[in-house]
Image (cartoon, helix red, strand yellow):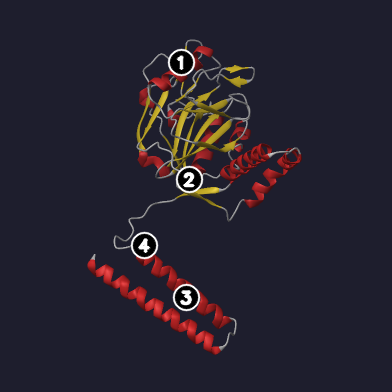
């Protein structure tokens, strides 16, 4: 669910409570209510992630989900969720109505939308006939040009009515829900919640055909990005060094390593790309015995190859080759026998 609470305390509290009552997995808020510069968190159930200016935020309400900060600017916060069958990126965006639209859009320029499943929710303060207005302004045209480059789908249905209703400023459609093509077949429903919202903006909900359960079955693609991790670690070297010098006992060592591992993990998770481990059906006949024979055969082949390439005595090369051929024959015989039986 998404909503702009327009810095209203009751609107902010109501949004959190509504999301909990509806059993939602996450909530995105624009222009939240702040206390001493920090967004209000009136519920102990959710965890809040904010943009740098705290203009937009995401609340993760499903306790089974673990979120990682993927991207953050003044007006954008993007979280990465690892689900059972895909990695989902959720964005909360607020473009101030009087800021330069080019500057606002440029905050997205260093983010790569490719090869990921993205949902963008936010208050863009842009007008276009595409999502309900009777005309297109300069901001709307610029946003449409940006969206056209990335081939997303706007979920808004103008027949559902405006997303903004004000007795002073009339009505409008500033909020958008944007889903990229790779995820469009997972969208079940987009709508406006018929509930009092204590704000000029209305609750927007999106139902997805996904299992919102956390998955740890992924791996980091470390071929690219090591330099960014090291650059991110550099400002933390001096504090870590001071912490290390203050170590006097085993408890201090444990404390240092907990801090170091936490810093390194957050950097790696935020920078390296991830890929879900997709379980294959596998071979039904495969078992531990075959695995042992295969490993033995591979080991024998490596020994034979190493001796052959290192100009070992001819007798040793022949012996290694005979051992490999013998192991390979046993493995193939056992493999064919088990395949026939299955």
Nearest to N terminus: mark 1 or mark 4: 1
* Measured Cα–Cα span from mark 2 to mark 4: 36 Å
Q: Horizontal and vertical percent for residue 119?
A: 46, 36
Query: For mark 2, does the 10 Å Cα neighbourhood hold few (<14), some (14 to 19), or many (20 or more) residues?
Result: some
- Where does label 2 land, which residue? 116
Residue 241 shown left or right of residue 172 in the figure: right
Task: Report the front residue among 277 and 245.
Answer: 245
Nearest to N terminus: mark 3 or mark 4: 4
Q: Residue 101 bears which disc, if any?
A: none
Nearest to N terminus: mark 2 or mark 4: 2
* Measured Cα–Cα span from mark 2 to mark 1: 32 Å
Q: In this rendering, does residue 162 appear at all?
A: no
- Where does label 1 land, which residue? 14
Give the foreground label among 2 and 4: 4
* Measured Cα–Cα span from mark 1 to mark 3: 68 Å
Query: For mark 4, does the 10 Å Cα neighbourhood hold few (<14), some (14 to 19), or many (20 or more) residues?
Result: few
Q: Horizontal and vertical percent for residue 287?
A: 34, 62
Asked if labels 4 and 2 touch by Cβ distance under 8 angstroms, the answer is: no
What's the residue at 42%, 22% (across, down)? 19
Q: Horizontal and vertical percent for residue 242?
A: 76, 38
Nearest to N terminus: mark 1 or mark 3: 1
- Numbered-mark total: 4
Look at the image and tell me in which quarter the N terminus lies. Answer: top left
Give the foreground label among 1 and 3: 3
* Measured Cα–Cα span from mark 3 to mark 4: 18 Å
* Measured Cα–Cα span from mark 1 to mark 4: 56 Å
- Where does label 3 land, which residue? 300
Q: Horizontal and vertical percent for residue 215?
A: 43, 42
Task: Report the front residue among 78 and 305.
Answer: 305
Return the residue found at the far top.
Answer: 167
User: What element does badge 4 sit on?
Assistant: helix
* Measured Cα–Cα span from mark 2 to mark 3: 42 Å
């Amino acid at each position: 669910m998404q909503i702009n609470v327009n810095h209203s305390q009751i609107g902010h509290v109501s949004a959190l409570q509504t999301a909990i009552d509806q059993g939602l997995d996450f909530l995105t808020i624009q222009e939240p209510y702040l206390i001493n510069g920090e967004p209000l968190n009136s519920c102990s159930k959710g965890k809040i992630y904010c943009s740098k200016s705290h203009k937009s935020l995401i609340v993760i309400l499903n306790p089974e989900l673990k979120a990682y900060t993927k991207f953050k600017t003044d007006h954008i916060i993007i979280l990465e969720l690892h689900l059972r069958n895909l990695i989902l990126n959720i964005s909360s965006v607020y473009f101030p109505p009087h800021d330069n639209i080019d500057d606002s859009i440029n905050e997205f320029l260093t983010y790569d939308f490719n090869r990921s499943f993205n949902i963008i929710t936010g208050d863009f303060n842009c007008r276009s006939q595409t999502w309900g207005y009777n005309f297109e302004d300069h901001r709307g045209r610029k946003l449409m040009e940006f969206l056209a480059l990335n081939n997303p789908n706007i979920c808004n249905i103008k027949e559902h009515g405006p997303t903004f209703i004000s007795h002073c400023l009339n009505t409008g459609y500033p909020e958008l829900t944007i889903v990229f093509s790779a995820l469009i077949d997972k969208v079940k429903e987009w709508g406006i919640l018929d509930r009092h919202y204590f704000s000029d903006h209305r609750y927007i909900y999106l139902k997805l055909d996904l299992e919102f359960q956390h998955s740890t079955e992924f791996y980091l693609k470390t071929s690219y990005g090591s330099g960014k991790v090291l650059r991110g670690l550099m400002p933390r070297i001096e504090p870590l060094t001071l912490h290390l010098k203050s170590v006097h006992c085993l408890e201090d060592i444990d404390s240092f390593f907990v801090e170091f591992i936490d810093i390194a993990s957050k950097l790696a998770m935020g920078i390296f790309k991830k890929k879900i481990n997709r379980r294959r059906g596998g071979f039904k006949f495969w078992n531990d015995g075959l695995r042992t024979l295969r490993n033995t055969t591979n080991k024998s082949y490596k020994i034979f190859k190493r001796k052959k390439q290192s100009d070992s005595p001819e007798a040793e090369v022949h012996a290694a080759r005979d051992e490999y051929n013998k192991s390979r024959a046993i493995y193939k015989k056992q493999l064919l026998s088990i395949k026939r039986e299955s």
